[in-house]
């Protein structure tokens, strides 16, 4: 195997912790000696042992002259677990290959420096682009203290998310819809507006076997959510947060009795102030938001510059009709030069559908 293959294996392992380690980073580690992988590990749960320690503790042979490949710089501070840099130094490993530097201010190069001071050879920035992409959620959250926001939608080839009657099931095929379930498993929060709840009565859960349900956040400024909606009826089983600016206090008590949590946030142009809501979610250690809302919510998120990435599923069919809605509403831009441009775009096929994902500049 090559150096790149060892790091790719570490990245593959890191993905296994997706969704369960939030708001920690996804990290994978591989130990190689004499051309053989002799140990590997990944960060599996928030508060659990880090990838490096899992790999080191699983090894059944001497680590002298071995090389550690790790997707993220080893930590050098004590949090919920002891510093990984200490364990690596004590293990006898002679070389460490690091993908990404840790943007956490408590680390930020300190782990690499500690390893080098102890006499270990440390190579940094190896397959950095791939490793950075692995932890773009963590990097944003740890530096901004607000969740990373992904805008997701499915549309037809002519840019419609529903027919003129509002019918939308199903635009994409099963493979694309399965991929959406993987997103729900990965992101800590899923967000929609009250209009989506009233129109579709969604459940907003992760339907993967063994998957993790995200916190459901409903932007419902006037507390219009029906008491018999799927969201409310399952609130005791699935964490649910209603973001309001006003509303019937008696209904508020009913909703809380049914298992919903309610947070009052400032109002902006008659709606929930999304920037204030994201700050609130960040303070609750929620590192990521998957917006699956309709044109109004997505339009507001884009207008306010709150979206970090877009994931659009495009089906090879057309609805037509001037009254059929498109994915993003809001005020929009005044000229093509002011458009929301995407970079580092990736195109993936899911059956007959294609998916385009990119980062918002």
Image (tube, rainbow, N blue to C red):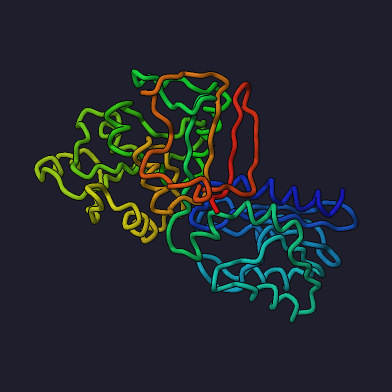
Q: Position of residue 25 (x, y in %)?
A: 56, 57
Say which of 168 and 122 sits in front. Answer: 168
- Taking depth in this image into account, of 45 and 272 the one nearest to the observer is 272
Q: Whole-percent x and y of residue 227? A: 19, 32
Q: Residue at x 75, y 77 (%)?
A: 116
Q: Residue lying at the far left in this picture: please name it.
A: 250
Q: Position of residue 192 (x, y in %)?
A: 35, 39
272 over 177 or under it: above or below: below
Query: Which residue corresponds to the image point at 75% horizontal and 66% vertical from the top-left?
Result: 124
Quadrant of the rendered structure where residue 292 is? top left
Question: How many tags in the picture?
Answer: 0
Q: Residue furthest front?
A: 335
Q: Up-down: is 182 above or below 24?
A: above
In the displayed structure image, the side of residue 113 where residue 17 appears, left or right: left
Residue drawn 39% across the image and 48% down it: 301
- 292 is higher (above) or lower (below) than 229: below
In the image, what residue occupies the spot 87% across and 48% down?
1
Front-lying residue, 160 or 272: 160
Residue 150, percent from left and from top: 49, 45
Side of 71 where 304 appears, left or right: left
- 102 or 19: which is nearer to us? 102
The residue sitting at the bottom extreme is 117
219 to the left or right of 252: right
Q: Is residue 254 left or right of residue 217?
A: left
Quadrant where the image shows the C terminus: bottom right
């Amino acid at each position: 195997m090559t150096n790149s293959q060892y790091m790719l294996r570490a990245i593959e392992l890191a993905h296994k912790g997706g969704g369960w380690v939030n708001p920690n980073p996804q990290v994978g580690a591989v130990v190689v000696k004499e051309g053989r992988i002799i140990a590997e590990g990944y960060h599996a749960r928030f508060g659990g042992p880090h990838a490096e320690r899992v790999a080191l503790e699983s090894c059944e042979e001497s680590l002298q002259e071995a090389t550690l490949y790790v997707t993220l710089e080893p930590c050098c501070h004590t949090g919920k677990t002891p510093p990984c840099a200490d364990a690596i130094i004590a293990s006898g490993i002679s070389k460490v290959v690091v993908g990404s530097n840790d943007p956490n201010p408590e680390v930020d190069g300190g782990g690499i420096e500690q390893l080098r001071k102890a006499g270990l050879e440390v190579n940094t920035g190896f397959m950095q682009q791939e490793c950075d992409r692995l932890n773009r959620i963590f990097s944003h959250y740890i530096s901004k203290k607000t969740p990373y926001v992904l805008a997701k939608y499915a549309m037809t080839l002519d840019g419609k998310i529903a027919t003129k009657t509002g019918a939308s099931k199903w635009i994409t095929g099963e493979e694309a819809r399965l991929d959406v379930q993987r997103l729900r498993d990965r992101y800590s929060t899923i967000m929609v507006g009250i209009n989506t709840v009233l129109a579709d009565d969604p459940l907003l859960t992760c339907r993967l076997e063994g998957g993790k349900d995200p916190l459901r956040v409903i932007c419902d400024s006037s507390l219009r959510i029906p008491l018999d909606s799927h969201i409310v009826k399952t609130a005791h089983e699935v964490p649910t947060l209603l973001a309001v600016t006003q509303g019937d206090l008696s209904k508020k008590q009913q909703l809380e009795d049914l298992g919903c949590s309610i947070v009052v946030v400032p109002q902006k142009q008659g709606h929930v102030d999304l920037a204030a809501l994201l700050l609130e979610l960040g303070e609750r250690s929620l590192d990521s938001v998957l917006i699956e809302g309709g044109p109004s919510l997505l339009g507001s998120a884009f207008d306010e510059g709150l979206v970090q990435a877009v994931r659009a599923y495009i089906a090879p069919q057309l609805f037509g009709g001037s009254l059929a809605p498109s994915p993003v509403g809001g005020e929009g831009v005044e000229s093509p030069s002011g458009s929301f441009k995407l970079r580092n775009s990736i195109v993936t096929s899911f059956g007959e559908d294609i998916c385009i994902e990119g980062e918002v500049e």
